[in-house]
Image (cartoon, rainbow, N blue to C red):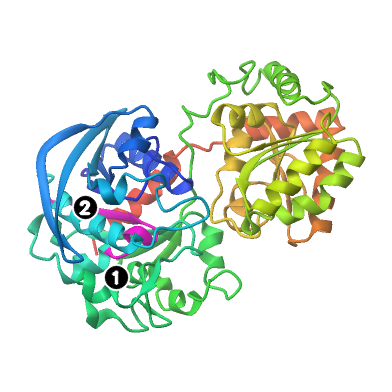
Amino acid sequence: MDAMHIVFIASEAAPLAKTGGLADVAGSLPHALQELDHRVTVIMPYYRDIIARAGYTPQAMDDTIEMWADGVQRHCPLHTITIDGLRYILIEQNDLYNRAGIYGPPGGAYEDNLLRFLLFDRVALEVAARLGDTIDILHCHDWQTGMIPLLLKTQYQHHPEIAQAKCVYTIHNLAYQGNFPAEWIHRLGLPSHHFHPDDYEFHHQINCMKAGIASAHAITTVSPSYAEEILTPEYGCELDGFLQNHRDKLSGIVNGLHIDEWDPQTDTAIAANYGPGNTAGKKACKAALQRNCGLDENADTPLLTLISRLADQKGIDLLLANAQQWLDRGYQLAILGSGDPHSEHLLGQLAAANPRQMHFHCGFNEALARQIYAGGDIFLMPSRFEPCGLGQLMAMRYGTVPVVRATGGLRDTVIDYGESKSRATGIKFNDATAAAFDAAVEQAVALYRNPRIWARLRSNALKRDSSWHASAERYAALYRSLLTT
């Protein structure tokens, strides 16, 4: 099979800049595709200070792209860096991209985000056209690049290197659609004849995600179940009817992990290394986590863990409704996260009142996250919706048994004990209620108290293949199908 030339265009990509799962996909899937012998380039904005803090120093290219945007002629120098064999090209525009946040201040969004990312989209298309060979696939991600399929169809057909490229558009989270006032249409030169309900108009506003859905050759989501869920009013975020009209090009492919980076057998951040067939180190990791968090050091106490954005989507209210009774039952809690200020306050209060049983770290700390994945017994993900989820994959990778709500990627990646006692990797519950969540945790704790059953659950979780290989093959097959039709 001939190698394909694939260009990923994304607003963030690990390890250079990350706010969530989009960055993990944009940084990991290209590696897996390269291992299948395809040529891949990642294009993203140059967040100068953020990337420097991540420890990377891109090199300036001898190339600058001129682009008119919102009444200003902008000069966009290009930079490049290669990480583990994967080439990134970064687009510089310091007043737009070199800011404290990628999308906005904490809890907010920059008012000029459409200008920021439409400029990026246009320059990225120009960059792709200069890569030297004909591009087969342009793979775009979330609302920030949703205009690219439309622009390619309407305004960039004069570039022969990209004119025949097929656009794949991945929805990582339908809740964030990129809605902006219609006045930007003329300010940014958007194709006004596509501003109607069957394209990117949404309640008289611009909707960038609708543009991507309407014009892409294929639409993917990050799990098969989420692809089904977004066709329903409950999960469709008012786009379910629109998506129904495009369902023939919609599919779901579950995310993977960069398993070399998430490996308890080699992880230097945890107290002891371990893996399938040699789990002794996990006991040491639990003891170290209890000590570091100020919890009573007891190997027999169930240690429940959670690493999450503190938001309604993540079911944090279900956690808060149950936390005190779990502490009353003698369980321990180790929680890492930030988000909703009220949730942060309540978790802080609980931890302060129960310092030997509960630890709450407000914010994010990667070393502590790895220690929680390795040291916990049970990992909690009570999400109301979860397009894919990476936390449950990381937890299973470290042999920590997940308790998850059966939605989206959580449904697809966790095998429930009730479904198969021999192959189970965790516990799932259906209703987004505090009672259903508590019942699932109690079932997990009961299994934890049976060493034989728990050892099998933990072993199954450790052995689960969460690599990108299978998913990359599915993406490659999708790309190939577009090129042969």
Q: Is residue 139 magenta?
A: yes
Amino acid type, label 1? Ser
**Which mark, by number, is residue 280?**
none
In this image, 258 relative to 464: left or right?
left
Disc 1 residue crowd, few under 14, some 14–19, many 20+, Cα 10 Å: many
For the residue pair 192 and 229, the one nearer the viewer reads as: 192
Q: Is residue 53 magenta?
A: no
- Is residue 483 visible from the viewing direction of this image? no
Distance from the alpha carbon under mark 2 to that under mark 1: 17 Å
Residue 143, picture quadrant: bottom left
Amino acid type, label 2? Ala
- Is residue 294 visible from the viewing direction of this image? yes
In this image, 399 relative to 2: left or right?
right
Disc 2 residue crowd, few under 14, some 14–19, many 20+, Cα 10 Å: many
The answer to whether residue 416 is above or below residue 375 is: below
Which residues lie in the magenta part? 134-147
Residue drawn at (38%, 71%) of the image: 180
Q: Please identify the quadrant where the N terminus is shown.
A: top left
| Residue that label 2 marks | 124
The answer to whether residue 198 is above or below residue 325 is: below
Where is residue 24? Give x, y as percent.
44, 42
Residue sitting farthest toward the right: 329
| Residue that label 1 marks | 215
Where is residue 186? Give x, y as percent.
22, 76
Residue 26, picture quadrant: top left
Where is residue 232? Give x, y as percent.
57, 74
Residue 385, picture quadrant: bottom right
Residue drawn at (48%, 64%) of the image: 174
Contact check, label 2 and label 1, Cβ < 8 Å:
no
